[in-house]
Image (spheres, grey):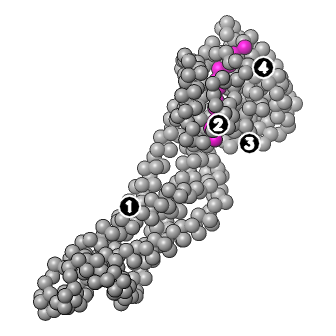
Amino acid sequence: MKLTLLVQLSWRNLWRHRRRTVILLTTICVAVGSVLVLNALLRGMQMSMVETAIDNLNGHFKVLAPGYLDDPGITKSFELEPSGIPGLSAEGIRGWAPRVRVPAVIRSERETRGVQFVGIVPGSEDISFLGDVDVDGEYLSGPDDRRILLGHALAEQLETGVGRRVVLITQGADGGNRESGYRVAGVYDAVGTGIEKAFVFTGLATVQDLLSVDAVTEVSVRLTEEARGPSVLGDLTNTFDGLDVRTWQDLEPQAAMMHEMADATVSIWFLIVMGALIFGLVNTLVTAVMERIRELGMLRAIGMRRGAVIAQVVIESMITMVIGISTGVVLGLLGFAWLAEGIDLSAFAEGLELTGLRPELVPQLWAQDVFLVVVLSLVLGFLASIYPAHRAVRVQPLDAMRR
């Protein structure tokens, strides 16, 4: 039989029982649409954790002296050429930032706290969270600025503010304590209070003068394209021979684990929803075949081949899946557009900070996720139609016509 005739027969058979067909189409549409929306939310959570990990003074790569992570201090430092990072191509790199980062104690008139004292080049910190923070007061003017930036939460703990003086105590390269007073230039408001309590910033040259060194303890590199990661990693490894080059996954293992779990969650959710949907599709097709046993037997008796019967059942299934998937994709895109501005989760900010999520969840719909859902749904729909199709040709024509 011609394919066009089989398609016409399949189309007519679908609408013999309109209610059943509409219910099945609605189920497919809702399943596909919900999978796409949930995927977008999971991808948004995934990228939020990644961006937070990278923004947290890590970058995509960080160069450190061996042993620094185990014993952070100025003794684990290295010298950096004034010209920057030779041998590193600018292609695919957003920027890099040298820093001196040492543990310290900050003391105000009333309180004392342990912090990370970080010397920075302010113009290079657009690759970290400092590039987006709101500052009450003034930002650091340059690497020679002798003022400091405090986090809002830390300023509250110290009961200090803009224009006030505080004292910082740290350890020099010779093992002796170094103490100096600083005036607060500004108070920054970061995404999480943990960051605000942890970091105190000043100019890079200021910290180097305090510690009597010309070295840095870390260099962070941020990419514009993830695909450039392997080549940049190779360049950094060759340039900084004898130093440790760590990825953000090495520095933030919890965020890296959550990132991998998000990929697995997307696949598991899809298999659960589509698996349940396929059982419903198989049941519906088997019911439709059993209701048409006499009709199929008659078609076989007048010369319709087994292959044509199988093809007709498969075509019915694929028509149903194509209509349902197309409508479901449209529904998913509408749901994504409705949530595209982001979901405010600030009421759960404290819990979200522990997982590395930001207070605003912005969904991300990836083209490959849409393609994967569409293709796998069609494949599963095709496989689900095989059993009912073979069930349709098992019955002999004479036995079918006697029913």
Which of the 4 image quarters holds residue 157?
top right
Disc 2 crowd rating (10 Å Cα; few below 14, some 14-19, many 20+) is few
Which residue corresponds to mark 3? 132
Magenta-colored span? 214-224
Spatial separation of the CA atoms under disc 3 and disc 4: 23 Å
Q: Are marks 3 and 4 in contact (CB under 8 Å)?
A: no
| Amino acid on which the number 4 mark rests in the picture | Ala
Which residue corresponds to mark 4? 205
Report whether residue 402 is seen: yes
Q: Residue furthest bottom?
A: 402
Disc 4 crowd rating (10 Å Cα; few below 14, some 14-19, many 20+) is many
178 horizontally vs 309: left or right: right
Task: Identify the mark nearer the N-term, 2 or 4.
Answer: 2
Q: Position of residue 142 (x, y in %)?
A: 82, 27
Q: Are marks 4 and 1 in contact (CB under 8 Å)?
A: no
Spatial separation of the CA atoms under disc 3 and disc 1: 40 Å
Q: Are marks 2 and 1 in contact (CB under 8 Å)?
A: no
Which of the 4 image quarters holds residue 317?
bottom left
Which is more toward the observer, 355 or 44?
Answer: 44
In the figure, 214 relative to 166: above or below?
above
Which residue corresponds to mark 1? 272
Which residue corresponds to mark 2? 91
Q: Position of residue 312 (x, y in %)?
A: 30, 80
Task: Identify the mark nearer the N-term, 3 or 1.
Answer: 3
Query: Which of labels 3 and 2 is toward the front?
Result: 2
Task: Identify the mark nearer the N-term, 3 or 4.
Answer: 3
